[in-house]
Amino acid sequence: MSIQPVTVNRDKDGYWVHPELPEWDEGTTQEEIDTWFSNNNLSYWIDNFEDSTTATEEMQDAYFVNGDVGVPDWKPECPVEGSFLLSIHDTEDGPVAVFAIPKQ
Protein backbone atom coordinates (compact mmCIF):
# COMPACT_ATOMS: atom_id res chain seq x y z
CA MET A 1 0.00 0.00 0.00
CA SER A 2 1.54 3.30 -1.03
CA ILE A 3 -0.99 5.86 0.23
CA GLN A 4 -0.92 6.32 4.00
CA PRO A 5 -3.00 8.24 6.54
CA VAL A 6 -2.07 11.90 6.94
CA THR A 7 -3.20 14.70 9.23
CA VAL A 8 -6.60 16.00 8.16
CA ASN A 9 -6.86 19.80 8.00
CA ARG A 10 -10.34 20.62 6.74
CA ASP A 11 -11.05 23.96 5.09
CA LYS A 12 -13.51 26.51 6.49
CA ASP A 13 -16.41 24.67 4.85
CA GLY A 14 -15.33 21.32 6.29
CA TYR A 15 -13.96 19.79 3.09
CA TRP A 16 -10.62 18.07 2.59
CA VAL A 17 -8.86 15.78 0.10
CA HIS A 18 -5.87 13.53 0.82
CA PRO A 19 -2.88 15.03 -1.03
CA GLU A 20 -2.08 11.68 -2.70
CA LEU A 21 -5.60 10.97 -3.94
CA PRO A 22 -5.86 11.26 -7.74
CA GLU A 23 -7.86 14.19 -9.11
CA TRP A 24 -10.80 12.26 -10.49
CA ASP A 25 -13.55 14.07 -12.36
CA GLU A 26 -16.87 13.22 -13.98
CA GLY A 27 -15.02 11.54 -16.85
CA THR A 28 -13.24 9.08 -14.57
CA THR A 29 -14.70 5.60 -14.90
CA GLN A 30 -15.56 3.31 -12.02
CA GLU A 31 -13.07 0.84 -13.51
CA GLU A 32 -10.27 3.44 -13.24
CA ILE A 33 -11.19 4.15 -9.63
CA ASP A 34 -11.40 0.45 -8.76
CA THR A 35 -8.02 -0.16 -10.42
CA TRP A 36 -6.39 2.60 -8.37
CA PHE A 37 -7.77 1.16 -5.14
CA SER A 38 -6.70 -2.35 -6.14
CA ASN A 39 -3.19 -1.17 -7.07
CA ASN A 40 -2.94 0.45 -3.63
CA ASN A 41 -4.21 -2.70 -1.88
CA LEU A 42 -7.27 -0.83 -0.62
CA SER A 43 -11.01 -1.00 -0.67
CA TYR A 44 -13.19 1.95 0.26
CA TRP A 45 -16.26 2.93 2.23
CA ILE A 46 -18.42 6.00 1.64
CA ASP A 47 -20.31 7.89 4.33
CA ASN A 48 -23.07 9.94 2.65
CA PHE A 49 -23.92 13.09 4.60
CA GLU A 50 -27.63 12.70 3.85
CA ASP A 51 -27.73 9.24 5.47
CA SER A 52 -24.84 9.59 7.92
CA THR A 53 -25.39 8.60 11.53
CA THR A 54 -22.99 11.39 12.51
CA ALA A 55 -24.85 14.18 10.66
CA THR A 56 -27.59 15.66 12.81
CA GLU A 57 -30.93 16.72 11.39
CA GLU A 58 -29.92 20.34 12.05
CA MET A 59 -26.74 19.91 9.98
CA GLN A 60 -28.67 18.27 7.16
CA ASP A 61 -31.34 20.99 7.18
CA ALA A 62 -28.67 23.70 7.11
CA TYR A 63 -27.15 22.14 4.00
CA PHE A 64 -30.17 20.77 2.10
CA VAL A 65 -32.89 23.26 3.15
CA ASN A 66 -31.08 26.49 3.99
CA GLY A 67 -28.43 26.18 1.29
CA ASP A 68 -25.35 26.35 3.52
CA VAL A 69 -22.38 25.22 1.44
CA GLY A 70 -20.32 23.83 4.27
CA VAL A 71 -20.35 20.91 6.66
CA PRO A 72 -17.65 21.96 9.15
CA ASP A 73 -19.36 20.28 12.11
CA TRP A 74 -19.88 16.92 10.40
CA LYS A 75 -17.58 14.23 11.79
CA PRO A 76 -17.94 11.30 9.37
CA GLU A 77 -16.90 7.87 10.55
CA CYS A 78 -16.09 4.52 9.01
CA PRO A 79 -17.12 1.40 10.93
CA VAL A 80 -14.07 -0.54 9.71
CA GLU A 81 -11.08 -0.61 12.06
CA GLY A 82 -7.86 0.60 10.45
CA SER A 83 -9.61 2.75 7.86
CA PHE A 84 -8.48 6.30 7.16
CA LEU A 85 -10.01 9.35 5.52
CA LEU A 86 -9.34 10.07 1.85
CA SER A 87 -11.74 12.96 1.32
CA ILE A 88 -14.74 14.94 2.43
CA HIS A 89 -16.11 16.56 -0.70
CA ASP A 90 -19.33 17.84 -2.20
CA THR A 91 -21.20 16.03 -4.95
CA GLU A 92 -24.40 16.81 -6.84
CA ASP A 93 -26.17 14.61 -4.25
CA GLY A 94 -24.55 16.27 -1.25
CA PRO A 95 -21.36 15.84 0.75
CA VAL A 96 -19.65 12.48 1.07
CA ALA A 97 -16.69 11.18 3.03
CA VAL A 98 -14.53 8.51 1.40
CA PHE A 99 -12.48 6.22 3.61
CA ALA A 100 -9.66 3.89 2.57
CA ILE A 101 -9.71 0.39 4.01
CA PRO A 102 -6.38 -1.45 3.83
CA LYS A 103 -6.75 -5.02 2.59
CA GLN A 104 -5.33 -7.68 4.88
Image (cartoon, grey):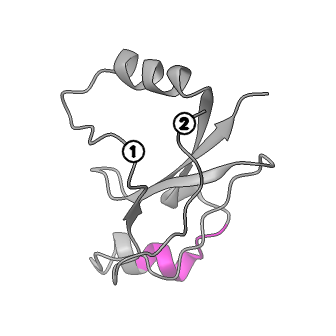
Task: Locate residue 4 relative to residue 103 in the image: left or right.
Answer: left
* Residue 63 percent coordinates (x, y): 36, 74
Q: Amino acid at mark 1?
A: Leu
> Is the C-beta separation of discs 2 and 1 under 8 Å?
no
Q: Residue at x 69, y 36 (%)?
A: 102
Decide: few, some or many residues near mark 1? Use Cα within 10 Å; few <14, some 14-19, many ≥20: few
Image quarter of residue 88 = bottom left
Label 2 – label 1 distance at C-alpha? 11 Å
The residue nearer to you, when weighing 104 against 48, is: 104
* Residue 93 percent coordinates (x, y): 34, 50
The residue nearer to you, when weighing 31 against 46, is: 31
Image quarter of residue 22 = top left
Magenta segment, principal secondary structure?
helix
Q: Can you say whether 74 is above or below 39 in the image? A: below
Q: Amino acid at mark 2?
A: Ser
Range drawn in magenta? 54-61
Q: Which residue is mark 2?
A: 2
Q: Residue 95: in sight, yes or no?
A: no
* Secondary structure found at label 1: loop
* Secondary structure found at label 2: loop
Q: Residue 83: in sight, yes or no?
A: yes
Report the quarter where the N terminus lies: top right
Report the quarter where the C terminus lies: top right
* Residue 72 percent coordinates (x, y): 45, 81
Magenta span includes 31: no
* Residue 32 percent coordinates (x, y): 35, 19
The residue nearer to you, when weighing 102 against 27, is: 102
Residue extending farthest front: 2
Name the disc covering residue 21, or none: 1
Q: Residue at x 77, y 46 (%)?
A: 80
The residue nearer to you, when weighing 98 against 91, is: 98
Q: Residue at x 40, y 47 (%)?
A: 20
